[in-house]
Amino acid sequence: KRPPASILFIFGGSGDLNYRKLTPALYNLFLDEWMPDQFAIVGIGRTEYSDEKYRGHLQEGLDKFSRRKAETDSHYQEFFQHVNYLQLDAGDIASYQRIADYVCKKEEEWGVHPNVIFYLAVAPQLVPSIAQELGTLNLCKEKNTTRIVIEKPFGHDLESAHELNDLLTGLFAEEQIFRIDHYLGKETVQNILALRFANALFEPVWNRHYIDHIQITAAESVGLEGRGGYYEHSGALRDMVQNHILQLMCMVAMEAPVSFDANEIRNKKVDVLNAIRPLKKEDVHEYAVRGQYGAGWMKGKQVTGYREEKGVNPQSPTETYAAVKFFIDNWRWQGVPFYVRTGKLMHQKSTHITIQFKDAPTFAFPSEAAESWRSNRLTISIQPEMDIRIRFQAKRPGQTMSLDPVNMTFTYDNSDDHTPEAYETLLLDVMEGDATLFMRADQVESAWKVIMPILETWENRHPVDFPNYVPDSWGPEDADALIARDGHAWINLP
Ligand code: BG6
């Protein structure tokens, strides 16, 4: 079923996110016949564009970034009939009336009151003032149909996130606010819930009695991609751990939901965040490692070090790699370490979760039968591979009793273009008013609470050994030591 009639106003309409992600996602929804019968997309920006020029600009983006390519030009034409541009200075209060006028016009034309969605794809410092102006429009009092979508970063620390929440919840009802974490829109991330809660097989062993430890890796092979100005004030912990990685951890660790109601799922996730053992500042060095890449080579190409990147301070203490060991203090997870890591310019792009099960309680085979008993492992690959592997011991064919670990793999077919992109799923959910895959105010703040001791410790103690890893590697040696102290090693997928 398609969502009801909708108007999407995209602040930052001439910006990069819209060009690369939002318009391509909306276009794919259109081709897949998921867009409402009546819809309008209005880019809002300061740049001067005619509708025609604006459409031409976005079409370039579609050629480059769309999952599905236009088979004929008529698809583009049909889609772009729904796209307009509104030049508007976000600081000019009077111009917001033009938004309300646009909605009235469409309402008359369509004969229904549409969903009105304000997507703020703008620099974080502009969010409060835009939200405030929007809040003055009568439109925004319509709780069931008007929504506001906020991109990350959601605050810079706990205090600023709290302030932003205060401001937004003063203007909008919580069910009108959609805070994006695009990882939650990924197919393979949603599949974690299916794996865990649609099968009876895994639940009995999904706890401290059977699981030795869990690893979450979000390694990127790209560097800053020209975002030095933003990244320099963020760093890996804020950019990836506070949001994406902690969300993955919630999906893996949460209790079974009673229903798929948005608040039920989010309650269960927030329980995980609240149960993460708070780190004491004096212990941070034992539980967290940071890294920054220097100059080097990446797949045969020379790359500059982080400190030489545009927009970066030549003595920058900003981390481009972070690894943390967490514990979750509840009955299910007591004593099970969760090792998480993320970094830029790593050897390969790979986001995956590994559940390492405990060893068999006793091993009756001759000792020469197997090199290691540590065989039982479940790996959920989020990207670029999209699969789930179970590793177990099997007999090697032959006259001797020799064992080898083997993999049983389920793979999503990622060779064609059928898998929707995260933004497609999330935009569709916004039009449908389903907030399950979005962050609630308390989730965001709880996630900040988890990382604050690390942030504050790192901010007060400048790293002396930066840069401490080379491009095309798996990060700093200290990160290997962090996990080796517990007798483990990071698992890199082949
Ligand atoms: C974004 C971060 O939220 O996620 C980027 O700001 C990062 O720095 C990106 O590259 C990773 O997303 P994905 O979907 O490519 O894993």
Image: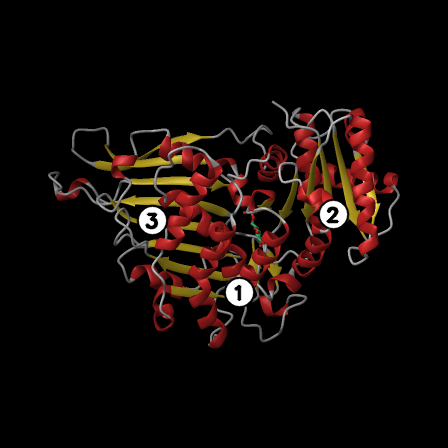
The quadrant of the rendering that contains the N terminus is top right
Q: Residue at x 78, y 55 (%)?
A: 90
Residue at 27% x, 40% y is 376
* Sooner in the amino-acid sequence: mark 1 or mark 2: 2
The image shows residue 91 at horizontal and vertical percentages of 78, 58
Q: Position of residue 334 (x, y in %)?
A: 26, 52
The residue under label 2 is 137
Secondary element under disc 2, as helix, strand or loop, is loop
Q: Is mark 1 within 8 Å of ligand 1?
A: no
Q: Work out whether residue 298 can be spotted.
A: yes
89 vs 448, left or right, is right
Label disc, if present, on residue 12 of the rendered structure: none
Label 3 neighbourhood size at 10 Å, few (<14), some (14-19), many (20+)? many
Q: Position of residue 423 (x, y in %)?
A: 61, 39
The three-letter code of the residue at mark 3 reads Ile
Q: Nearer the viewer, mark 2 or mark 3?
A: 2
Q: Could you tell me the amino acid type at mark 2? A: Leu
